[in-house]
Amino acid sequence: SVSFTRGQSTTTLTTILYKAETTTITATDGGLYGYASSSVTVDAGALNNYQVVAATPQTADVCFTGTNTVTARDQWLNTRTQDASVVNMTTTGTSVTFYTTSACATSTTQYTISSGQATMYIKTPKKQSGFTVTATRNGFSETGTSGAITVDPGLASAILVKLPGQTFTDG
């Protein structure tokens, strides 16, 4: 409750803001009048986790397309645009490789976050489904894991003729 004497109040109000943004706070008298404060800037908090986004489905033996990113976030899920941490990449998939660029030529196990985000470059020669990729801050415990990723078979490069008595394993 705020009390006023001759149109002014000296009541101190405590406000906790979680969303990283520049905003104003407006006080109204319950009628037509409201007065906005000057700008209030809320910065992201300390690094808490990573959001790992991998587009799906993908195609086997082709560098992943679409949005494939690691984003540094605070505990309220705000992007930490000032973050420059290094993340170690792991996967539950088979024969999945991380690369330094979209050419998918030079492999890596780490990405450096820049302005709060890093782009992942991934490729696998295997058709598979349900695997994930995880980013973990190098030397620390902050982590994030993607949703399930599906990789469909690539274009056929050969025809297999199966004779009676022979077996074949897909993949």
Image (cartoon, rainbow, N blue to C red):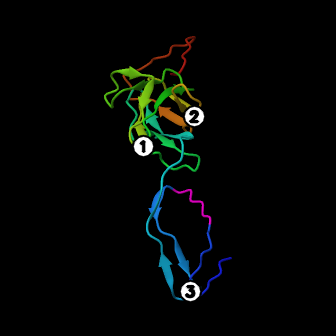
Farthest-out residue, top: 165
Q: CA distance from mark 2 to mark 3?
A: 49 Å
Farthest-out residue, left: 103
| Discs 3, 1 touching: Cβ within 8 Å | no
Instruction: Check disc 3 and give the amino acid type.
Output: Gly
* Image position, residue 163 (x, y; %): 51, 13
Farthest-out residue, right: 1
Magenta run includes residue 16: yes
Q: CA distance from mark 3 to mark 1?
A: 42 Å
Left or right position of 130 against 65: right
Tag 3, which secondary structure?
loop
Label 2 sits on residue: 142
| Residue sitting at x 51%, y 70% | 25
Image-quadrant location for residue 82: top left
- Between circles 2 and 1, the one closer to the viewer is 1
State which tag comes first along the sequence, 3 or 1. Answer: 3
* Image position, residue 113 (x, y; %): 42, 35
- Between circles 3 and 1, the one closer to the viewer is 3
Where is 111 relative to 1, above or below? above
Q: Which residues are magenta?
A: 14-19
| Discs 2, 1 touching: Cβ within 8 Å | no
| Residue sitting at x 33%, y 31% | 102
Instruction: Check disc 2 and give the amino acid type.
Output: Glu
* Image position, residue 170 (x, y; %): 53, 22
Label 3 sits on residue: 7
| Residue sitting at x 46%, y 65% | 23
Tag 2, which secondary structure?
loop
State which tag comes first along the sequence, 2 or 3. Answer: 3
Label 1 sits on residue: 82
Q: Is residue 114 visible?
A: yes
Magenta run includes residue 20: no
